[in-house]
Image (cartoon, grey):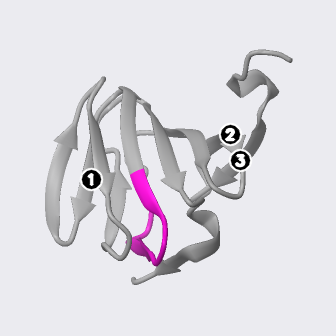
Amino acid sequence: MEAISKKNSEHYTWGGVCDGWHLLKTPALSVIQERVPPGGTETRHVHQQAQQFFFVLSGEAVMELENKEVVLGPQQGFAVPPGSPHRLLNRGNTDLAFLVISAPPGHGDRVSIE
């Protein structure tokens, strides 16, 4: 038994410049810490079953949800219900670090809509 951190978690990259670490990966729940550099963004997409909660650790996130934008700073979060088109952007000048919590995990039901 040991504490979970980025140092001992499964790492992956996405978008060519972004990082993710699976802090918890079970069939029912996913907790991922991600890093998005300035100018980084994900593609607009939807999850058919997964409900997600994004929580900013540092930096500033812009969450697009159904063509509206919400700006999130450190220690702020935002819920995305299943079936809602969304994407996350970093328009700031520093790295964005955040947690994305998905139930069930969102990797299997992600559908790009761009």
Which of the 4 image quarters holds residue 74? Answer: top left
Q: How far, Cα to Cα, is label 3 from label 1? A: 23 Å
The residue depicted at 39 percent of the width and 47 percent of the height is 53
Q: Left of 40 or right of it: where is 2?
A: right
Which residue is label 2 attached to? 24
Say which label, 3 or 1, has the lower sequence index: 3
Nearer to me, 88 or 77: 77
Q: Regarding mark 3 in the picture, which secondary structure is present there?
A: strand
Q: Is residue 41 above or below residue 78?
A: below
Expressed as whole percent of the image width and height from the top left, the position of residue 16 reads: 62, 56
The residue stretch that appears in magenta: 41-52
Identity of the amino acid at label 2?
Leu
Residue 41 in sight: no
Q: Give the alpha-carbon distance from disc 1 to disc 2, as whole Å.
A: 23 Å
Residue labelled with disc 3: 25
Q: Quadrant of the C terminus?
A: bottom left
| Label 3 vs label 1, nearer the camera | 3
Mark sitting earlier along the chain (1/2):
2
Give me the residue at 77% from left, 33% from top.
Answer: 9
Residue 32 image-quadrant placement: top right
Near-viewer residue (26 or 42): 26
The answer to whether any part of residue 102 appears in the image is yes
Q: Picture coordinates of residue 52 (x, y %)?
A: 42, 54
Q: Tell me if mark 2 has few (under 14), some (14-19) or many (20+) residues whose alpha carbon lies within 10 angstroms of its own.
A: some
Q: Are marks 2 and 3 in contact (CB under 8 Å)?
A: yes
Q: Disc 2 and disc 3: Cα gap in Å? A: 4 Å
Residue that numbered label 1 is attached to? 63
Determine whether 77 is above or below 89 in the image.
Answer: above
Q: Nearer the viewer, residue 91 or 102?
A: 102
